[in-house]
Amino acid sequence: MKKIPSALFIITLLLSVAAQADVHEFTFDNGLKLIVKEDHRAPVVVSQVWYPIGSSYELPGSTGISHALEHMMFKGTEKHPAGEFSRIISENGGRENAFTSRDYTAYFQTLEKSRLPISFELEADRMRNLTLPEDEFLKEIEVVKEERRWRTDDKPTNYTYEVAMATAFQTSPYRHPVIGWMSDLDNMTIDDLEQWYRDWYAPNNATVVVVGDVDPQEVYALARQHFEPLPPEKLTPPPPRPEVEQQGIKRVTVRRPAELPYLFMGYKVPSLTPAADADPVVSESELYALEVLAGILDGGNSARFASRLVRGSEVAASVGAGYSLVSRMDSLFTITGTPSQDVTTADLEQAIRAELNDLRENLVTPEELARVKAQVVSEDVYEKDSMFYQGMIIGILESIGLDWRLADEYVGKVQTVSAEQVRDVVRKYFVDDRLTVAELDPLPITEPPRPPRGGLHLDH
Amino acid sequence: MTTRIFLLFVLWTGSVHASPDIQTWTTDQGVQVLFVEARQLPMVDLQVLFHAGSTGNGDKPGLSALTNHMLSQGADGLSADDISQAFESLGAVYGSDAGYDSAMVSLRSLSDKAKLDKALETLERVLAKPDFPVDAFERERNRMLIGLRAKKQNPGSLARDAFYAAVFNEHPYSRPVEGTEDSLQAITLDDLRAFHERYYVAANAVVAIVGDLTRNEAGRIANRLTGALPRGRPADPVPGVEPLTEAERVFIEHPSQQMHILMGQPGIRRGDEDYFPLYVGNHVLGGGGMISRLFAEIREKRGLSYSAYSYFSPMKQPGPFVAGLQTRADQAEEAIAVLKDNLRRFIAEGPTAEELEASKKNITGGFPLRIDSNNEILAYLAAIGIYDLPLDYLDTFNDRVEAVTIEQIRDAFARRVSPDTIVTVMVGPAPGSGEDAAN
């Protein structure tokens, strides 16, 4: 009992109990779910409305429609015409915005706590009553195209990332960029948005998450008043589009004006998806082992990538690893990096492969494992400094069809991961038949720009 | 607006929001400490700040940033690996950053005594006894050079550097904090050691702490972190910024689809007497997000840009006033015309009474949001310390916002913003060069 691991476990347990004690879940007859998390540190409330809809629901030819609709959600209802939503929130001292991802779209306001009713009234109104005026759409779709130019087309590494995802995934909708292909934005109509809105924006397809200095019963009463009268919609789930089994490595080169080369490596790995339980080949412990692996490789300046590739051999100016533990469908474990001066992307790829081989053959050290676990325990405390982030965790889990209580199990499950389990997931998943490598091969920046998409073959 | 919302609003205006209780004192070494006790979470955030920004670089741009970055690359016999392991094995997070006016190191740790103590032990050595090892120096300088090349493929970064260069001419603010290729190549280890010796001293430091500590515990921590620092002498004052005398247009050709546009000129100092009229006025003009004029005119009415904004960035000496947007290259002139027209009109007329009221409501009504986390409170403590702002800055913030009048805004903008001497930076394809117009 005096050992440090026991102490960590007790801390974890206490945190989990505390976390559960102040979260309250309610479901209304129309299917709407409300989750309230009390946090009384400041007289503030965060209100988030989550819809499980995003680019992974979209069909070829209409990519970007979820994100475009997110923009149009600020363009008014009968009761609150275009601009009113933002004007009222602003006048009440609020901050607001929205974001769209592959699996969800979320709208949020942060307000002084007594003003939660304003958020609920406005959000309930736009859940079913958008007017979607065509003149507003014609302007807003141009804003979305500017966003795409800014976010993707004029950023060589982001552009390469987009190509890499479209290459890695053949049948899975994770090949779609969230912002959509430019040609799809060009062809999008207000009728398309109208249909998408009717199909997906309904109380039985929404989770309202509230975090802050509130009384859960009062929030419940308020939600009854505003959201309960909304009629539900018949939901038709999108066709399942699982990724076909990859056979052999995929490689793609992006030639584009840029200064620096860039390397992307993505291995197909499982995530904690709603379907994961049904998959007999994947055990849950593997998923947490992948999470720990990301920490071993890239969990800070003492992690292997920083200590061995940025320092050590100095082949990388920067290199990082990313894994989505929770995701609606299986995704990629990504490794991205910029080689050092006079180092090629091929050299960097070899150095990364050597690190993966090391992990395949040798166990990570107890110190490394302890470091990752200590970081997870600490982060679990640090993240409570942000009400917004606490709401995000609940909202993401619920939106991809998982139970928000999984968040409370996270620290404990990471603590159980062993060095052998980390080695085993590397052996199982980090193989060429699961790998996509994308490389940015810079063209001189002084040359005139290439025509959009020239020389690339993304869609076949 | 519905009756219900109206009633809520009336009810709300009566309530009062307490600012955090800032405790302040000086350490044995004479360093100012700003501390807010926050017991709800078992964690501590702190920053040790120095007047060691890029204004102290002399003719070696990048020196302050490289020195700041190198602190954790070897200290008191510990290697970069040792240092990062020491923090991260505890779950602690070390950070560092250098800007124009100051540089800092930060620590986030659990408040657990044993863990915090160990993290502080490492931080103390990093602050006072950096080794500046030669191999780490070469490596980190090379990484900074790669960082400079990354800026060259980013039209936003190119625009920013060109804008500061044009607005601040010979002033140290004109040069990028990260330095230039030539300047980084010329920096030596001796330069780093000399910079550290000159600026990372007690007479030049401020400590900001927020977290799960008593006043006495915070006092011991501050003494410990600054105890090993030599007394030294304060940094020299930052030289004044010359106002611009004529308008200038800078164009940098870049193979992007969008034109990045920045307009502006020297603005205001921290603590400037015009701060509140300009801050509140700019909220109406381009600082108020989705309700600001620039957002409405450029994005909402015309669909020209994803973002359209303006802000004052107050520094020790007048930092920039900036208005910016990005738009498809063939629309650049139209967007600039709209931007300029709105700027001129705002300077001439100021906000309407309704606009001013709406902005005041947003700023004052959102006050609790500014200080709802340890992280945000720490940032205020750091700014109060480095810029020598009054300790009641947060307590009086809402009253000072409420007191601003249309006349004060018009007067302050007329004196402080001049469209006749404005810099316009454009980064993007040359006119007529592209297929962009086909879209």
Image: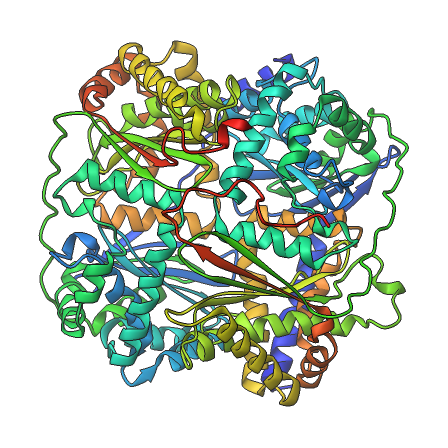
Return the x and y of residue B9 as percentages of the image width and height: 55, 20
Q: In which quarter of the image is residue A96?
A: top right
Q: Which of A299 and B358 is in front in this view?
A: A299
Residue A49, visible in the rendered structure? yes
Q: Quadrant of residue A44?
A: top right
**Measuring 45% from the left and 33% from the top, which residue is drawn there?**
B434
Q: Which of B161 and B104 is in front in this view?
A: B161
**Measuring 65% from the left and 35% from the top, which residue is drawn there?**
A183
Return the x and y of residue B356 as percentages of the image width and height: 39, 16
**Measuring 49% from the left and 32% from the top, which residue is drawn there?**
B435
Give the residue furthest to the bottom: A362
Q: Is residue B26 above or below residue A223?
A: below
Q: Nearer the viewer, residue A36 or A138?
A: A138
Left or right: residue B257 versus residue A360 is: left
Return the x and y of residue B15 as percentages of the image width and height: 49, 28
Residue B133, visible in the rendered structure? no
Left or right: residue A276 versus residue A19 is: right
Q: In this view, does A62 lie above or below B80?
A: above
Return the x and y of residue B52 as percentages of the image width and height: 20, 58
Coloring applied to the structure: rainbow
Q: How many numbered dots are placed on residues in this image?
A: 0
On-image quarter of the N terminus of chain A? bottom right
